[in-house]
Image (tube, rainbow, N blue to C red):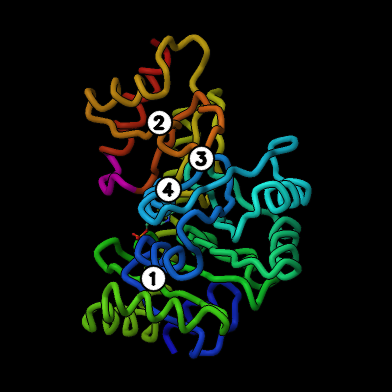
Amino acid sequence: MACRKWMSYLHFDSPADNLLFSMGSQNGIFACLASLFQEGDKIATTGVTYPGLKIAAKTLGIQIIPLSLKDNAFTRDSLDYVYKNHNIKGFYFIPDFNNPSGEQLSWECRKMIGDFCTEHSLPCIEDCIYSLFQPDPLPPISAFAKDQGIIIASVSKIMSPGLRLAIMRVPKQYASDISTTLYSMQITPPALMMQLFTRLVNSGRFDEIRGLRIRELIRRNQLFDEIFSGIRNNGHENSPIRWLSLPDSLKLSSMEFEDYMLKRDVQIFSAGRFVVGNTPIPRAVRISLISEHNESRYIEGLKILRSALSH
Ligand SMILES: Cc1ncc(COP(=O)(O)O)c(C=O)c1O
């Protein structure tokens, strides 16, 4: 019941039979890749993506192909291109606030991907780790690809990083393979964690936690906007990440800038960590708005970063 409720927050209604627990998104991503693809297969995603996907794919010998963009967005042509020219076997997307670039897929884009996956019978792994930071998220891609869409909805960011759990919605055709792989990796997540999750969700306590987290995130985004006014960056009031373009006046590459900031005790991640395939490395860095729990230290970190940009 708690897992069905969790999916309902994403506006997705799923029978309990299609829901599985993994030990966090990373574990779920690995299980999907290992179950659905063979060594040498290719899957497609955005030109910059979550590094954990890259590591998992590399470990399993799966190649990741970046989607081409037109006017900063991918189109049906981008999907057709990778399908025809790279014989891709599936997709991975972060529909809400792509890590690192912060973009959100529009309703139309979700439908386009869902329709494409249905048409070509391609699995679509959808990482909804940041979706619940919005009070009313858009429907997931899986809503448009009921037989192909896999939702991985972690609790780590919106509830607690210590609760290493994600709820996975898996269509019937992949359920047995993915659940066998999860079993081979973990047998089952710790019962204590599943119990805690279930109680927090069923008692309504999670709704309170989520409300607080959303309010805190909006405040952190406002603080960010005040401190970085006039600096080009990509974000949204409900996004826990910002993607900041480095000004031309700064004479450091994004990787050098990451090192420079680390020496000043501020951790940011440079674009090179996130690029896929031969995508040119953007001159940008990713900033997490939620990793630092203490608000004064968060503000201090942003100020150090802001002043470093002017050097
Ligand atoms: C997009 C994305 N997916 C997955 C993960 C890992 O999540 P989990 O802690 O649930 O394994 C992260 C962590 O930062 C992430 O940014």
- Residue occupying the point 44% across, 48% down: 50
Instruction: Indicate the position of residue 272 as horizontal and vertical percent values.
Output: 43, 31
- Residue occupying the point 78% across, 47% down: 77
**Front position among marks 4 and 2:** 4
Instruction: For marks 2 and 1, give the CA distance.
Output: 27 Å
The answer to whether the beta carbon of the residue marked 3 is less than 8 Å from any atom of ligand 1 is no
Instruction: Indicate the position of residue 172 as horizontal and vertical percent values.
Output: 56, 84
Q: Quadrant of residue 11?
A: bottom right
Q: Residues within 10 Å of mark 3 (few under 14, many from 20)?
A: many
Instruction: For marks 1 and 4, give the CA distance.
Output: 19 Å
What label sits on residue 276 in the rendered view?
3
Query: Could you tell me which secondary element the residue under label 1 belongs to?
Result: strand
Which of the two discs, 2 and 1, labels the residue nearer the N terminus? Answer: 1
Residues drawn in magenta: 291-296
Instruction: For marks 2 and 3, give the CA distance.
Output: 14 Å
Instruction: For marks 3 and 4, give the CA distance.
Output: 8 Å
Which quarter of the rendering shows the N terminus?
bottom left
The residue carrying mark 4 is: 54
Which of the two discs, 4 and 2, labels the residue nearer the N terminus? Answer: 4
CB under 8 Å between discs 3 and 4: yes
Instruction: Indicate the position of residue 195 as horizontal and vertical percent values.
Output: 27, 84
Which of the two discs, 1 and 3, labels the residue nearer the N terminus? Answer: 1
What label sits on residue 166 in the rendered view?
1
The residue carrying mark 2 is: 270
The answer to whether the beta carbon of the residue marked 1 is less than 8 Å from any atom of ligand 1 is yes
- In the displayed structure, does residue 25 sit left or right of residue 13? left
